[in-house]
Amino acid sequence: MSITSTIKTILIVGATSGLGEQFARRLHAMGKKVIITGRRAERLSFLKAELGTKIDAYQWDITDLDKVSSRASEITTAHPDTNSIFIMPGFGSILNFLDPSTSTDAKIIAECNTNVTAQMLLTRAFMPHLASVAAKGLPASYLLMGSGMGFVPNGTFPVYVATKAAIHALAVALRQNVSKDKNQNVKNNLSVVEVVAPYVATDFDKEFRNPAGPQPMPLEEFMENAMAQLALMGEDGKPPKEVAVGSAQLRLGLWRNSVGKYMKEVGMEG
């Protein structure tokens, strides 16, 4: 089975722009029920009006950390048929740790809270719901947005690359958690997938893109590749653990064939 073939209702956290919006549009076009969240109420209203049926929207700032659990519970209670959740939010900043003038403590904290802390809390809030779906013998999936820079860091974005390395480690650890669950249905039916993006043309770098430097992959090209891979089934009959596009495929492959191989050999595969 593939991810896209098993989705009934998907919650996309962070879907008002960029990759999150594009995944929402693509999955909605496939006839899936899509729930979108984001900080910008006007964008949510626009998307809900444009897409029409089988769409719901919630304004949600995930960096309001004290309210993550209650907000997550509110959504899954309202939509108990949610069997797939995709965590999208993330941003990166250029800075140099040798030059304090290039950043502030507040900016670093904000980047870490958005890219890691909030996502850890979201994972704690959502994984039990998905496990309960899987326990009934139904397919469930949890998707995290990774980056090729989480495997091969670029020092221009030192905080961002560290947060994306953390998201990769989280995905691996979650698969280990699932593999050790006492419920065989959970082991068989709950998938954790990391979508690993290369440099893609979104608003991520609109303030500092260098026309003379490496150019991003066109958004449409990325989406075509990512959606095609989400429609694939692995050799074991389950969805692939990672979906990687462009240069991110090479970077992921380096990890899978070294650290990943070692982890499998010592019984810690994830």
Image (spheres, rainbow, N blue to C red):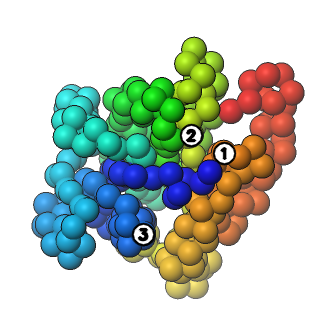
Badge 2: residue crowd in 10 Å (few <14, some 14–19, many ≥20): many
Element class at badge 2: strand
Q: Amino acid at mark 2?
A: Ser
Element class at badge 1: loop
- Compared to residue 122, the image places residue 144 above or below, namely below
Which label number is shown at residue 191? 2
Q: Residue furthest top?
A: 182
Measure the C-alpha gap from mark 3 to mark 1: 20 Å
Q: Is residue 149 left or right of residue 4?
A: right
Give the quarter of the figure containing the C terminus.
top right
The residue at 56%/75% (across/down) is 224
Query: Camera-side residue: 50 or 63?
Result: 50
* Tag 3 near tag 1, CB within 8 Å: no
Query: Camera-side residue: 111 or 37?
Result: 37
**According to the image, label 3 marks what residue?**
30
Give the image location of residue 76, x and y in percent.
26, 37
Which label number is shown at residue 16? none
The residue at 25%/62% (across/down) is 54
Q: Is residue 245 left or right of residue 250?
A: left
Give the image location of residue 85, x and y in percent.
40, 46
How many numbered callouts? Answer: 3
Badge 3: residue crowd in 10 Å (few <14, some 14–19, many ≥20): few
Can residue 126 be seen here?
A: yes
The residue at 21%/67% (across/down) is 53
Query: Camera-side residue: 173 or 156?
Result: 173
- Nearest to N terminus: mark 3 or mark 1: 3
Element class at badge 3: loop
Q: Amino acid at mark 3?
A: Met
Q: Is residue 195 left or right of residue 70?
A: right
Q: Amino acid at mark 1?
A: Lys
* Tag 1 near tag 2, CB within 8 Å: yes
**According to the image, label 1 marks what residue?**
238
